[in-house]
Amino acid sequence: MHGNNQALLNLKKDFPDLTRPQMIVFDYGGTLLYEPNWDPRRGNEALFKHIKTNKNNLSPEELHDFSQQLFAQLSQVRSLNYEIHEWQFQKLLYEYLEIELALTPPETEKVFWDHTSAGAVMPGADRMIDFINRQGIRSGVISNISFSGQALAERINRLLPNNRFEFILASSEYGIRKPNRLLFDLAPKKAGLDPSALWFSGDNQHADIAGAASAGIFPVWYRDRSVDDPFMLKDSAGAPPCAHLDIFHWDELVEILENLS
């Protein structure tokens, strides 16, 4: 067990009848991957190099500042568990500023995200993915994210090339965010399984853990906070109000699954 054996002790004490899942669905950010050195100014500056026309002669700094203000305004809907889509955001941003880019929406999104942060793998996530693949445990992803499902899948496949995710669901494609149980209900439907055959693992007490439990999916609260990420949660909301497992490193999940087998 990595660091301590609390997760295994909780497993034996609190869930004596728990069986190994047929599928584990994962959150994305702060769970499988994270965003080191996040800097949207870098992303906006990179896009500035692809401008065809700039009617108002705006500077990169003016573009960035307005972009931040606009995203903050539109993000108010996210607190209501609705989602915005990056392509819509960029369309509004550049048309409003009367700037034309020599890029398609997918290209615009990729240039921005890649330059804002290249992304990195959470400690041990790659080894954990290799383990569940060897064990024949199916897997998928559900993420609260404004970037498109296409961009999300490309990033995950680049950084975790050995994954066998059967689906990668981005909230941007559905207009709603976790903990809305409709997103969680999609997982067993796509897998052809009963919800009780799935586990869901994520770092957010409310969106991931309580959300999964509301859909009858067993939640695993992933609590590694060792990396430098501006979006990393600090567990300030307290423990989730539902039965769940706590793990602090992916090695713990591997050991739990080995014991259940």
Image (tube, rainbow, N blue to C red):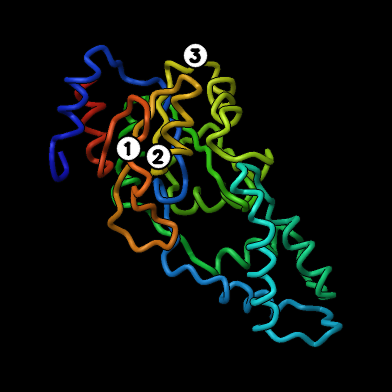
- Vertically, is 46 above or below 9? below
Where is residue 71 shown, x and y percent of the image?
Answer: 66, 63
Along the polypeptide, which appears first: circle 3 or circle 2? 3
Quarter of image, res 42? bottom right
Say which residue label 1 marks. Answer: 239
- For the point 31% across and 39% down, the residue is 128
Q: Vertically, is 148 above or below 131?
A: below
In the image, what residue type sits under mark 2?
Answer: Gln
Q: Is residue 86 left or right of residue 16?
A: right
- Of the residues tagged 3 and 1, which is closer to the observer? 1
51 displayed left or right of 131: right
- Number of marks present in the image shown: 3
Q: Quarter of the image for the C terminus: give it.
A: top left
Check the picture and name the quadrant holding the N terminus. top left
Q: Which of marks 3 and 1 is nearer the N terminus?
A: 3
SS class, disc 2:
helix
Q: In this view, does 147 lie to the left or right of 193?
A: right
Q: Which of marks 1 and 2 is nearer the N terminus?
A: 2
Q: Which residue carries the number 2 mark?
A: 205
Tell me what residue is drawn at x 41 percent, y 58 percent. Answer: 120
Cα distance in 3D space between marks 3 and 2? 23 Å
Asked whether the residues under the numbered discs 1 and 2 touch, taking CB atoms below 8 Å apart as contact, a structural biologist would say: yes
Q: In this rendering, which labeled residue sits more in front, label 3 or label 2? A: 2
